[in-house]
Image: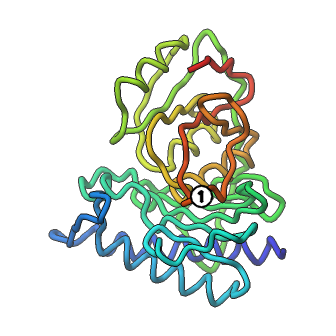
């Protein structure tokens, strides 16, 4: 695998998709529909999916491609695949709260090894480099030319004063009860895969998710967190969190900086 070429194209595809998303975000009345699972989908989801899919299929024709908006064509047999959420945080997009991202990742043998997370409305771009180290790029974001980048890494947590981030749209009583097991100095809410990135940059120590997600929701953020020295584990037993599961459906999980003393469910 030529990881240098891969990351050039993943970064470029994410930025171009972000530009398309922001064009639609600026429209006063964009179309919103309900999918079969009652989750919302917009023309921005579909436009970004079409753009990313076309670019990735052209650049990497031999790699399986899994995207949220093309669920019927998923390849469950590939051990190596690209996985895409063209607009993660559609609810945040519809409510114009800005916490939405473009997520693209490469999974190898159950592990998200490279990824990019772009939050166009927030002006934040995170990705792994060819060696797997995670970076944050400063804007403006030119799809053809990399800007100034800063390596990112998790912080050393203080278990007597943890920084916790939780879902903005999907937080519930079970999540609050679990967070209450920790000594929390600060609790913030964020949407989409930005929560992984906040742990990756040291802006948070812990992100528990006790709710339904799919692998395209998490793979890119997981790759960025791993590349910054963080970990994602299964909620129920703290075993490693893997990918390529049946239907690409996730169980509950905990994303954290090493050193956080994880509590039992």
Q: Which residue is mark 1?
A: 246
State the residue at coordinates (60%, 67%). 83
- Image coordinates for residue 192, horizontal then vertical, percent: 45, 50
Q: Quadrant of residue 263?
A: top right
State the quadrant of the C terminus: top right
Where is residue 72? Give x, y as percent: 47, 75
The quadrant in which the N terminus is found is bottom right
Residue 22 placement, left or right of 149: left
User: Residue 121 appears in which quarter of the rendering?
Assistant: bottom left
Q: Secondary structure at mark 1?
A: helix
Q: Residue at x 56, y 73 (%)?
A: 74
From the viewer's perspective, tell me whether residue 56 is left or right of residue 43.
right
- Asked whether 223 or 161 is in front, the reply is 223
- Mark 1 surroundings within 10 Å by alpha-carbon count, few (fewer than 14), some (14 through 19), many (20 or more): few
Q: Residue at x 40, y 24 (%)?
A: 174
13 lies left or right of 91:
right
Q: Position of residue 147 (x, y in %)?
A: 64, 66
Res 93 → quadrant: bottom left
State whether residue 174 is above or below residue 225. above
Rendered view: 168 above or below 81: above
Name the spot of residue 128 as percent of width and height, x first.
72, 58
Q: Nearer the viewer, residue 192 or 133?
A: 192
Vertical position of residue 40 compared to residue 252: above or below = below
Image point (69%, 65%), residue name: 106
């Amino acid at each position: 695998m030529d990881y240098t070429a891969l990351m050039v194209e993943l970064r470029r595809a994410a930025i171009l998709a972000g530009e398309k998303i922001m064009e639609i975000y600026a429209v006063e009345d964009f179309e919103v529909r309900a999918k079969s699972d009652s989750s919302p989908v917009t023309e921005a989801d579909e436009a970004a999916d079409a753009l990313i899919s076309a670019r990735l299929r052209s650049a990497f024709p031999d790699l399986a491609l899994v995207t949220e908006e093309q669920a019927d064509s998923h390849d469950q047999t590939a051990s190596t695949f690209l996985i895409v959420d063209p607009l993660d945080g559609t609810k945040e997009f519809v409510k114009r709260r800005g916490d939405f991202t473009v997520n693209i990742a490469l999974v190898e043998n159950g592990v998200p090894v490279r990824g990019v997370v772009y939050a166009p409305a927030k002006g934040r771009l995170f990705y792994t480099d060819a060696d797997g180290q995670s970076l944050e790029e400063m804007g403006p974001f030119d799809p053809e030319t990399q800007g100034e980048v800063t390596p990112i890494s998790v912080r050393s947590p203080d278990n007597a004063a943890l920084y916790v981030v939780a879902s903005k749209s999907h937080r519930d009583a079970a999540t609050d009860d679990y967070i209450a097991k920790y000594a929390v100095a600060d609790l913030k809410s964020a949407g989409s895969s930005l929560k992984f990135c906040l742990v990756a940059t040291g802006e948070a120590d812990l992100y528990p998710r006790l709710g339904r997600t799919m692998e395209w929701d998490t793979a890119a953020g997981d790759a960025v967190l791993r590349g910054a020295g963080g970990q994602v584990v299964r909620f129920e037993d703290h075993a490693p969190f893997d990918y390529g599961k049946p239907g690409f459906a996730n169980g509950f999980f905990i994303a954290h900086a090493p050193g956080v003393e994880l509590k039992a469910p």
